[in-house]
Image: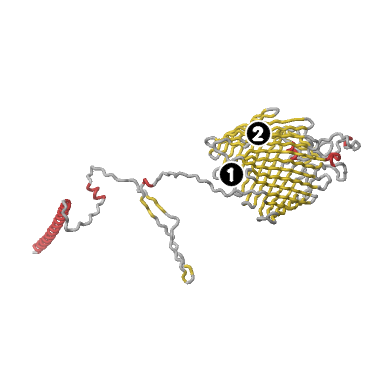
C-alpha cells in the first residue's frame, strides 16, 4: 500500500509540471505572433505612405541603431573597415579666469572675494585641415616719417670776458650769421698770462671762421679757415733774477690753415659714396723757418649685392720744410678693400699700397668684427697700418719747447690688435684692447745736445769744457725720430651717460717698449695715461664739467756733459668748471685748473703753475 501511495503522488507532481510548461509555451507563441503582426502592419503602413496614403496613427520615433548590430548583420567574408586614426583634440587652458567679485560694502567692510582655484578644461574637435594655415603677409605701404621741427638758428653774438690769478686775461667774441643757403660763424679770441717766472708769460691770439654752404638738399660744403699766433719764452734753467732781453728766449709761431669738405648727408644704396676733403696749413717759427702742408683725401665706397661693399679710399699729402736746408715728403696711399656683412660677422679684406718720395710698400688691411650670440659682447681683431706725413705744427702741439727740426720724416705704425666691446646697457658701454705695434720714425723729445759756447767763454763747466749757456738761450728740446721701435699696448675705455644730464668718459692706455733701435729711452713718451671727463647738467641754469688726468713713467735726461736717464714724477691734474645762467643775455662762468696744486713737470726743468682760478661773464646779443 505504501508503494502504491508513493507512485500516485509522483504521478500527480509530473502532471502538474507538464501543464505549467505547456501554458508557458502557449503564452510565448502568442507574443511572437503579436510582434509579427505588428511588423506586418508597419510594413503595410510604409508601403501605403510610399503610395501617398496618410496613416491615421502617428509614427513612433526611430530606434537607435548600434554599430555592433550592423556589424553582426554583415557576412563574415566581407571585411569591415575601421578608422584607427586617433581623434585630434585641442586643449585650451586660459591663464586668465574671470570671476565675479562682490565689492559691495557690508558694515563698512569689503566683502571677501571668492577665490576660485579650480581650472576648467575644454576639449574641442578641430578638423585636421584647420590645424595648419599658410601665412600670407599683407602688402606693406611705406609711410613718411614724421619729424619734429628742426631747430631754428638765429643771428647771435657772444662776448666772453674773464680774469684770474697770475694776471690771466681772456677776451672772446663769437658771431653767428644765418642766411637762406649759408651759415657763417666768426670767432676772435686773445688769451694771456704772466705766471710766476718773468719768462713764464705767454699770449695766444686766434681768428677762426667756419661756414656751411648748402648746395642741394643732400649736399653742402663745410669750410674752416683760421689764423693763430702763439708767443711764449723758454724759461727752463733761466734764473728769475736774470735781466737779459726777452727776445733771446722768444718762442713765437704763426700758423695759417684752411680746410674744405664736401659733405653728403644722404647715403644712397646704389651709388658711389664720397666725402672729399682738402687741407692746407702753413707754419713759420721764431727763426723764420717754415713748413707747408697740403693734403687731399676722401673715403670712397660702393654697395654691392649680398651685403658686400667695395672701398677705394685714398689719401695724398705733401709736406715741405724750409729749415737749414729744404726738404719735402710726398705720401700717396690707396686702400682698396671688400667689406662683407654676413651672419652677424663684419669682415674687411684689403691691402694698403703706399707710395712715398723714397720707396713703395704694400701692407695688409684685415679687420674682423663679430657680435657674440645672445650677449652684449662684440669682438674685433685686425692688422692695419697708419702712415702720417709729419707736420711741424704737430710736433709743437706735443712739445712747445722744441727748436726748428732739421728734417721731417714719415711716421708709420703697423698694428695687430684684438678688442672687446661690451654694450652693457643703454647707459653703460666699456671695452678693452691689446695690440702689438711696430713704429718707424716715431718722434722722441730730448734736450738739445750741449755745444761749445761762444757767448759766455768765462763760464767753466765740468771736465773743463765750455758748453752752450742755458741761461743765455733757455732750455731747448729737439725731435729725434726713432728708426724702429716695437711696443705692446693695453687700452681700455668706459662711457656712462644718464639721459642728457650726466655723462662720464674714461680712457686708459699703457705702452711697454720691447725694442728701441737708436735711442736709449723713449724720451718724452708717456707710457701710462688715464683721462676721465664728466659733464653734469645740475639744473636748467647750472652746468658743471671737469676732468682728471694722470701721466706716469715719462723718461728724461739730466743736465750735463753726459746724458743720464731719469724718470719724472707722475703728473696728476684735476680741473673743474661751471657756468650759471643769470638771464637770457647774461651768464657767469668759472674755470679752475690743477686744484690739487701738483708741482709737476711735463717736460724736464719746465715747472708748471699751481692752482689757477679764472672767472668771468658771457653776454649774448640776440637779434
Display coloring: secondary structure
Q: Which residue is mark 2?
A: 315
Query: Alpha carbon of mark 1 to alpha carbon of mark 2: how far?
Result: 33 Å
Q: Position of residue 255 (x, y in %)?
A: 75, 39
Q: Position of residue 487 (x, y in %)?
A: 69, 37
Give the mark nearer the N terminus: 1 vs 2. 2
Q: Which mark is residue 377?
A: 1
Q: Residue at x 56, y 48 (%)?
A: 147
Is any part of residue 517 visible from this angle?
Answer: no
Q: Position of residue 406 (x, y in %)?
A: 78, 32
Q: Residue at x 52, y 35 (%)?
A: 305
Please state if 253 lies on the left or on the right of 345 as rendered: right
Looking at the image, which is closer to me, 378 or 448?
448
Find residue 365 and report its image quarter.
top right
Looking at the image, which is closer to me, 610 or 372?
610
Q: Position of residue 464 (x, y in %)?
A: 89, 35
Amino acid at each position: 500500500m505504501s508503494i502504491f501511495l508513493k507512485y500516485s503522488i509522483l504521478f500527480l507532481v509530473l502532471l502538474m509540471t507538464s501543464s505549467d510548461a505547456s501554458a508557458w509555451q502557449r503564452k510565448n507563441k502568442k507574443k511572437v505572433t503579436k510582434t509579427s503582426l505588428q511588423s506586418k502592419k508597419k510594413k503595410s503602413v510604409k508601403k501605403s505612405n510610399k503610395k501617398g496614403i496618410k496613416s491615421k496613427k502617428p509614427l513612433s520615433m526611430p530606434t537607435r541603431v548600434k554599430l555592433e548590430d550592423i556589424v553582426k548583420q554583415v557576412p563574415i567574408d566581407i571585411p569591415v573597415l575601421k578608422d584607427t586614426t586617433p581623434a585630434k583634440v585641442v586643449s585650451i587652458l586660459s591663464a586668465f579666469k574671470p570671476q565675479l567679485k562682490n565689492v559691495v560694502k557690508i558694515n563698512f567692510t569689503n566683502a571677501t572675494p571668492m577665490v576660485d582655484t579650480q581650472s576648467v578644461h575644454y576639449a574641442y574637435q578641430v578638423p585636421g585641415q584647420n590645424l595648419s594655415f599658410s601665412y600670407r603677409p599683407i602688402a606693406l605701404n611705406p609711410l613718411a616719417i614724421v619729424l619734429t621741427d628742426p631747430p631754428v638758428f638765429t643771428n647771435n653774438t657772444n662776448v666772453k670776458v674773464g680774469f684770474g690769478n697770475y694776471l690771466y686775461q681772456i677776451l672772446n667774441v663769437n658771431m653767428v650769421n644765418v642766411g637762406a643757403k649759408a651759415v657763417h660763424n666768426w670767432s676772435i679770441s686773445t688769451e694771456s698770462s704772466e705766471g710766476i717766472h718773468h719768462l713764464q708769460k705767454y699770449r695766444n691770439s686766434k681768428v677762426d671762421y667756419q661756414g656751411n654752404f648748402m648746395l642741394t638738399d643732400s649736399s653742402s660744403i663745410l669750410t674752416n679757415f683760421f689764423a693763430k699766433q702763439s708767443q711764449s719764452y723758454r724759461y727752463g734753467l733761466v734764473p728769475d733774477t736774470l735781466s737779459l732781453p726777452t727776445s733771446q728766449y722768444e718762442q713765437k709761431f704763426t700758423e695759417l690753415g684752411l680746410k674744405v669738405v664736401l659733405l653728403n648727408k644722404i647715403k644712397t644704396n646704389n651709388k658711389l659714396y664720397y666725402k672729399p676733403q682738402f687741407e692746407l696749413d702753413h707754419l713759420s717759427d721764431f727763426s723764420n723757418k717754415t713748413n707747408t702742408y697740403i693734403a687731399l683725401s676722401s673715403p670712397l665706397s660702393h654697395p654691392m649685392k649680398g651685403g658686400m661693399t667695395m672701398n677705394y679710399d685714398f689719401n695724398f699729402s705733401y709736406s715741405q720744410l724750409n729749415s737749414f736746408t729744404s726738404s719735402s715728403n710726398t705720401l700717396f696711399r690707396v686702400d682698396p678693400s671688400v667689406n662683407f656683412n654676413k651672419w652677424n660677422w663684419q669682415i674687411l679684406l684689403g691691402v694698403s699700397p703706399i707710395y712715398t718720395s723714397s720707396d713703395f710698400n704694400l701692407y695688409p688691411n684685415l679687420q674682423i668684427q663679430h657680435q657674440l650670440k645672445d650677449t652684449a659682447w662684440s669682438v674685433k681683431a685686425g692688422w692695419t697700418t697708419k702712415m702720417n706725413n709729419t707736420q711741424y705744427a704737430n710736433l709743437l702741439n706735443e712739445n712747445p719747447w722744441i727748436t726748428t727740426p732739421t728734417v721731417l720724416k714719415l711716421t708709420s705704425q703697423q698694428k695687430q690688435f684684438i678688442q672687446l666691446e661690451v654694450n652693457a646697457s643703454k647707459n653703460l658701454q666699456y671695452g678693452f684692447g691689446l695690440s702689438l705695434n711696430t713704429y718707424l720714425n716715431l718722434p722722441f723729445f730730448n734736450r738739445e745736445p750741449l755745444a761749445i759756447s761762444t757767448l759766455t767763454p768765462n763760464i767753466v763747466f765740468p771736465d773743463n769744457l765750455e758748453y752752450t749757456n742755458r741761461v743765455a738761450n733757455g732750455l731747448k728740446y729737439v725731435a729725434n725720430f726713432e728708426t724702429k721701435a716695437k711696443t705692446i699696448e693695453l687700452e681700455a675705455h668706459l662711457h656712462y651717460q644718464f639721459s642728457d644730464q650726466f655723462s662720464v668718459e674714461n680712457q686708459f692706455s699703457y705702452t711697454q717698449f720691447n725694442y728701441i733701435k737708436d735711442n736709449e729711452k723713449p724720451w718724452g713718451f708717456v707710457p701710462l695715461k688715464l683721462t676721465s671727463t664728466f659733464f653734469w647738467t645740475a639744473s636748467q641754469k647750472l652746468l658743471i664739467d671737469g676732468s682728471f688726468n694722470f701721466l706716469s713713467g715719462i723718461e728724461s735726461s739730466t743736465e750735463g756733459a753726459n746724458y743720464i736717464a731719469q724718470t719724472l714724477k707722475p703728473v696728476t691734474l684735476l680741473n673743474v668748471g661751471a657756468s650759471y645762467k643769470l638771464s637770457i643775455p647774461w651768464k657767469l662762468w668759472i674755470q679752475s685748473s690743477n686744484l690739487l696744486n701738483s708741482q709737476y713737470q711735463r717736460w724736464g726743468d719746465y715747472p708748471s703753475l699751481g692752482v689757477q682760478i679764472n672767472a668771468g661773464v658771457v653776454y649774448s646779443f640776440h637779434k
